[in-house]
Image: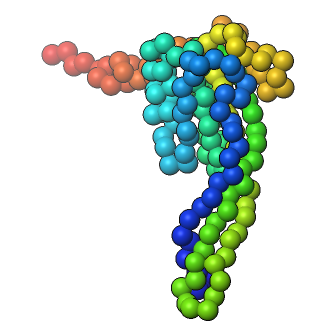
């Protein structure tokens, strides 16, 4: 492939929109491999705080493990219903030749995709879906930041003269 350069991609249209839910009050978060989980978690929490009933996390390829981690952290911050869907998407890479006399080459590959729908209420969700998970018990939910390093380690020693 030294004599070719990648000029474009075509993605097959797997319409994953509104899978597992019927509500119009849905916000979508696309998880990438480069993004920081803390930012995605803050963004999703803000969406819920501003009145969103559902948040859909979407990830492809190597970002799937990050999406699962983010969903689990969000579920431990507030009681959320979850529907998970796994699919695959066909991506066609198009290569143009760098030398004359060579043909354009197309290469097909399949990439795993995951859609995680997190919802405050079960209304509009298909709870019979094979990927449905009910909210965690309240004992396992810990809202807020549990970082307790503020006062215990920093500046806790005082000198008396």
Instruction: Identify the residue at horizontal 55%, vertical 90% (top origin).
Output: 99
Reply above or below: 152 against 15.
Answer: above
The quadrant in which residue 65 appears is top right
Seen from the viewer's position, the closer of residues 129 and 69 is: 129
Q: How is the image coloured?
A: rainbow
Seen from the viewer's position, the closer of residues 90 and 84 is: 90
Q: Is residue 135 visible?
A: no
Reply above or below: 124 against 108.
Answer: above
Q: Residue 148's x, y, as percent?
A: 44, 19
Reply above or below: 49 against 88.
Answer: above
The quadrant in which residue 8 appears is bottom right
Q: Residue 152's x, y, as percent?
A: 39, 19
Q: Residue 63's x, y, as percent?
A: 61, 45
Seen from the viewer's position, the closer of residues 160 and 117 is: 117
**What is the residue that sits farthest to the left in this orientation?**
161
Instruction: Identify the residue at horizontal 44%, vertical 15% (top origin).
Output: 50
Seen from the viewer's position, the closer of residues 62 and 15 is: 15
Q: Quadrant of the C terminus?
A: top left
Instruction: Identify the residue at horizontal 78%, vertical 22% (top origin).
Output: 132
Q: Is residue 24 visible?
A: yes
Q: How many marks?
A: 0
Q: Residue 147's x, y, as percent?
A: 45, 22
Q: Quadrant of the N terminus?
A: bottom right
The quadrant in which residue 16 appears is top right
Instruction: Identify the residue at horizontal 58%, vertical 78% (top origin).
Output: 96
**What is the residue that sits farthest to the top in this orientation?**
138
């Amino acid at each position: 492939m030294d004599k070719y350069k990648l000029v474009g991609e075509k993605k097959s249209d797997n319409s994953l929109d509104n899978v597992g839910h019927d509500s119009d009050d849905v916000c979508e978060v696309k998880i990438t491999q480069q993004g920081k989980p803390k930012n995605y978690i803050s963004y999703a929490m803000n969406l819920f705080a501003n009145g969103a009933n559902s948040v859909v996390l979407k990830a492809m390829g190597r970002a799937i493990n990050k999406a699962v981690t983010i969903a689990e952290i969000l579920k431990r911050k507030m009681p959320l219903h979850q529907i998970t869907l796994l699919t695959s998407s066909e991506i066609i890479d198009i290569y143009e030749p760098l030398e004359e006399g060579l043909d354009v080459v197309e290469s097909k590959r399949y990439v795993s995709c995951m859609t995680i729908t997190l919802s405050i209420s079960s209304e509009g969700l298909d709870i019979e879906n094979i990927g449905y998970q009910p909210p965690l018990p309240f004992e396992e939910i810990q809202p807020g930041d549990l970082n307790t390093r503020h006062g215990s380690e920093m500046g806790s020693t005082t000198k008396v003269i």
